[in-house]
Amino acid sequence: MKTILAYGDSLTWGHAPEGGGVRHPYADRWPSVLEAGLGGQARVIPEGLNGRTTASDDFTAASDRNGVRLLPTVLDTHQPLDLVVIMLGTNDIKTFIVGSAFAAANGMKRLAEIVRTFPYLNGLAPRIIFVAPPLTVPSPRNVAPASVSPRTTDDQLFDHYYAAAAKEVGAGYFNAASVAVASPIDGVHLDAANTRAIGMGLIPVVKQALGLQ
């Protein structure tokens, strides 16, 4: 059986748009849907952290959210791995982080470098898939809730920069915005149907990457 690491932020953790710490049921989170869709050929380890960035610090947070700094420990914890699926960037475009899809794509490339060069016990580096996050949308509240920081509209460029970054590092690629959109409740997080859609959309991409039927 193959082992897949799903490395992400609140969209991987299953944060519901209603806020207040509400989390989607386990079966509705995209890593769970992906695992179910692979029909017992792989297990998917969900590694989502609210607020995680690709490679930037957020000193306002209660815990370390820098994806680059945390990734080696996560790889060491869950090895051996056959595939790492990385969906990060939504927090990078917070105005007080970097506010740039281009910077987020560079962070993704650094994450890929870490995956490729980590000293695995079996000497085998896993394959990698980059996932461009869904787009944020205007919220009818006009003011973002306290748990959601202001973001730029640079997420419109995720697909452009992430596809190029994936090609540059030889990673697989999937644009989550092609199947999912954020909820207008808070403009950032996904309802259950949209987070499930990401898992469903990734099934053929993952099967191709791992040579599964």
Image (tube, rainbow, N blue to C red):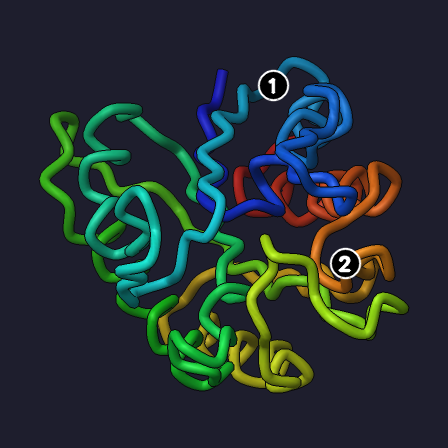
Nearer-the-camera pick, 188 or 43: 188
Q: Position of residue 101 (x, y in %)?
A: 51, 81
Residue 83 sits in which quadrant?
top left
Q: Can residue 213 be seen in the rendering of this structure?
A: no
Q: Is residue 82 above or below residue 140?
A: above
SS class, disc 2: loop
Q: Residue at x 84, y 66 (%)?
A: 141
Q: Residue at x 27, y 34 (%)?
A: 74
What's the residue type where badge 1 is placed? Gln
How would you rate the neighbour count of disc 2 (Cα within 10 Å): few for under 14, some for 14-19, many for 20 or more?
many
Q: Which residue is mark 2?
A: 186
Nearer-the-camera pick, 3 or 48: 48
Q: Is residue 172 above or below residue 161?
A: above
Q: Position of residue 165 (x, y in %)?
A: 44, 77
Q: Position of residue 41 (x, y in %)?
A: 60, 19
Q: Is residue 66 above or below residue 103?
A: above
Nearer-the-camera pick, 44 or 157: 157
Q: Which residue is mark 1?
A: 41
In the rendered structure, which disc, 1 or 2, sits on the residue that comes first in sequence?
1
Q: Residue at x 49, y 15 (%)?
A: 1
Q: Position of residue 157 (x, y in %)?
A: 62, 85
Q: Tell whether 96 sits left or right of 202.
A: left
What's the residue type where badge 2 is placed? Asp
Residue 168 sits in which quadrant?
bottom left
